[in-house]
Image: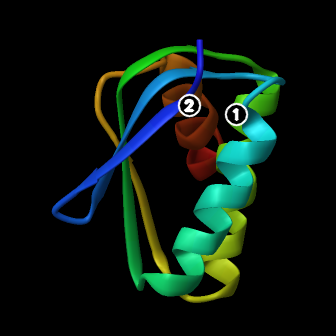
C-alpha cells in the first residue's frame, strides 16, 4: 500500500504503512516540511503498520526538529510501537 500524506490546518494525516519500502520517502518529505514550518504535527490514526525502519524514521525526524528548534508532535491512535518507543526514551 502506498503511503498517503494529506495536510489540513497544519496537521499532516498519514494513511498506509511506514516500513522499509516507504520510510525513506517519508523521512525525505518531512525533512523538507520541517524546513518550511516552525511546528509539524503528524496524525497516525490511519497508519496500519509500522516496522523498525518506520520507528527509526520518526526518531530521525524528532532529532532533526530538536536540532533546528522546531516543534514536532505525533498524535492519534495509530501504531502503538511509536508511542512505546517515545515514552520509553522520555522515561529513561
Q: Residue at x 73, y 22 (%)?
A: 19
| Quarter of image, res 30 | bottom right
Q: Residue at x 50, y 84 (%)?
A: 36
CA gap, disc 1 and disc 2: 6 Å
**Residue at the left extreme?**
9
Please say whether residue 62 is visible from this viewpoint.
no
The answer to whether 42 appears left or right of 70 in the picture is left
User: Callout 2: helix, strand or loop?
Assistant: helix
User: Callout 1: helix, strand or loop?
Assistant: helix
| Quarter of image, res 54 | top right
Please say whether residue 20 is visible from this viewpoint.
yes
Q: Which residue is mark 2?
A: 82
11 and 58: which is toward the camera: 11
Residue 53 percent location from the top left of the image: 81, 30
**In the displayed structure, would residue 1 be above or below residue 56?**
above
**In the displayed structure, would residue 50 be above or below residue 92?**
above
First in sequence: mark 1 vs mark 2 = 1
Question: How many numbered circles does the render carry?
Answer: 2
**In the displayed structure, would residue 34 be above or below residue 7?**
below
Pointers 1 and 2 in contact (CB under 8 A)?
yes
Q: How is the image coloured?
A: rainbow
Name the mark on residue 55: 1
Residue 79 percent location from the top left of the image: 48, 18
12 and 6: which is toward the camera: 6
62 and 3: which is toward the camera: 3
83 and 4: which is toward the camera: 4
How packed mark 2 is, by other alpha carbons closer than 10 Å (few <14, some 14-19, many 20 or more), is: many
Amino acid at each position: 500500500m502506498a503511503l498517503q500524506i494529506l495536510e489540513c490546518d497544519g496537521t499532516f494525516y498519514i494513511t498506509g504503512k511506514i516500513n522499509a519500502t516507504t520510510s525513506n520517502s517519508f523521512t525525505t518529505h518531512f525533512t523538507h516540511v520541517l524546513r518550511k514550518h516552525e511546528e509539524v504535527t503528524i496524525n497516525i490514526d490511519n497508519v496500519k503498520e509500522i516496522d523498525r525502519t518506520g520507528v527509526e524514521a520518526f526518531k530521525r525526524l524528532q532529532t532533526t526538529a530538536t536540532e533546528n528548534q522546531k516543534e514536532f508532535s505525533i498524535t492519534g491512535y495509530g501504531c502503538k510501537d511509536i508511542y512505546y518507543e517515545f515514552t520509553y526514551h522520555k522515561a529513561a
